[in-house]
Image (cartoon, rainbow, N blue to C red):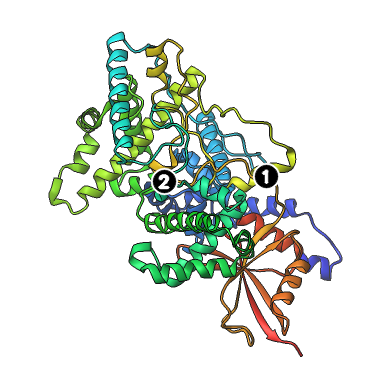
Amino acid sequence: MQYMRDTLNFAPSKRAFQTQFKRWDFPSKRKPAHRNEDLVDRVRELWEANYSQRNMLAVLHEEGHDIKERELMRLRAKHRWLMRIPNGAKQTPADEEEASLEAQLIAATQDDTTLDESAQPIQSTPTTRPVSADEPPEDFVQQQKERLEQLKAVSDDRLKHKKRRRRTKGYAGLPADPPGPPRFPSETTLEESREILALNVKQYRAIRDQFQSICEEEQILQKTVAGADKWQTVKNRLVSENNLLQDVFSKDTGDAEATQKKELALDVICTDVTKRLRTMGRRLTILESKNVLAINPEQGRQIRGRFYDILMSTHYTSKIEMGPEKWQELKDGLIASEPLLQQILAPGEEDPQHEKKKSALELICRDVMKRVRDDRAKKKGTFRKSLPQTEIQPEDQADESTFNGAYAPSLPANPFSEIAAAAQNAGADYSDLQIDPNLLQVADDLGSPQASTMTPVYIRPHPKSTLYNNTKMWLGSLSSRSVGELHAMLANKYPNAKPARIDGIEKDTSGEISYLIEEDEELDAYLDHVQGRKATFVVLLLAKA
């Protein structure tokens, strides 16, 4: 066609060319994905290994397969290789995109139609099983009421003898303890620590991220292992490198009690950061659990569905409510009814992975229990009800997008809501109670944040910089998403150097991925991409001419 344009001054129709090639039986320029047996087999292998659509596409491209996202969706829809989006944790924008893709696949398989190239993502509607309308029998209600009273008596006794920390929020149907100051330092909660240091949620998260970076650099995972001297050194470094903390500790320097409270609050936050560092890589996810058990998504749905039916045939809604013996009995019933699980667990203690497989099954069962609890709460109209709050001025509210990180607030449904309601005839409503952060060691639900348009960013010089190449990472903030402001901030920090290159960094399992930042649009796209995570820039600094 280009030859005809250049030499014959004639612009032929592309469609006419395609029609003629078809008449001449020319081979197709692009081989359809469903006819490529190697590609089909590889996609099935990835699906069997519980790869998501996004990860599947990345692996296929790395292996040299020429396939587009829509083609992969068509191929999966044709073979009904569907994936379930995990519930529980707050979804990231990437997860929401993945959920919309899965929703299109489900719709395509149900309608037996192909996916339209121009189809818009549709809202994901999770499949739910019918919730049993049967009310718990009276003897069951009485039994659970007695167990609740027993748990409360044990809890009160442990509090009296200082064998547990105070509960600032309700937990497992048990009310919060009477309000009061911490009886000893370790009872200071993360929320109280944040209030003592006068931090809003965004500032709190930035400080946690900064201290985590320091701990990773110094290879500190535990306060007691590091020793008192080194622990104090890294905390002092955090304060010296953070202007906000410097301002906090510079106030009321003559008040020894106030200073001691601030030091304790910072210590509580820093200790929790190291705890998260220790547990971050050890906790199984639903995806990892499926891979440990070597089950594909369809088998996973089958096992979950079976346990869902077992739980729905009872009236229990939590492990604590039923007790460990009953929980084990229900799990044993699941294994007895599922030949696949019997085959997986058959080797017993001789299998070096046996304990890990048991942990994986435990996690899946707990996740199903959460689904049952949520379904019952939806039926009763108590699902994730918000707590009554005092009126908040608009200037004190932060944008909802700031809650996409690891410490986003959550409000689990109360596992004892059904039992308490039936036993007390609409008495005290425990459905609004939140999980105690002291008991679960989480940093969730840290109150209403204050408004802030600042974006926290980490800056570190590139090792090949001719100046300041030994300078450590530091924390700054951007009020607008402009490269000009970023350059101005760098000029203020490094007056004798000019930035030759700026790269935005994203950490991956295989290392770091860099994105060259030259224009405002590129900076804006990068900050959107890492929203809820640490935005880090690596700067190549050269001496000014």
Q: Which residue is mark 1?
A: 398
At a point 65% along the width and 31% down the height, the residue shown is 390
Task: Tell whether label 2 touches label 1 (CB within 8 Å).
Answer: no
Inspect this view and state whether residue 287 appears. Answer: yes
Left/right placement of residue 478 relative to residue 91 reads right
Quadrant of the snapshot with the C terminus: bottom right
Is 387 situated above or below 489? above
Secondary structure of the residue carrying tag 1 is loop
**Res 141 quadrant in image:** top left
Q: Which residue is mark 2?
A: 187
Pointer 2: residues within 10 angstroms few (<14), some, or many (20+)?
some
In the rendered image, residue 237, in percent from the top left (x then y), is placed at: 52, 70
At a point 72% along the width and 85% down the height, the residue shown is 496
**Res 372 quadrant in image:** top left
Q: How many marks?
A: 2
Report the front residue among 108 and 89.
Answer: 89
Residue placed furthest toward the bottom = 545
In the rendered image, residue 103, in percent from the top left (x then y), is placed at: 54, 36
Q: Amino acid at mark 2?
A: Glu
Q: Amino acid at mark 1?
A: Ala
Is 229 situated above or below 206? below
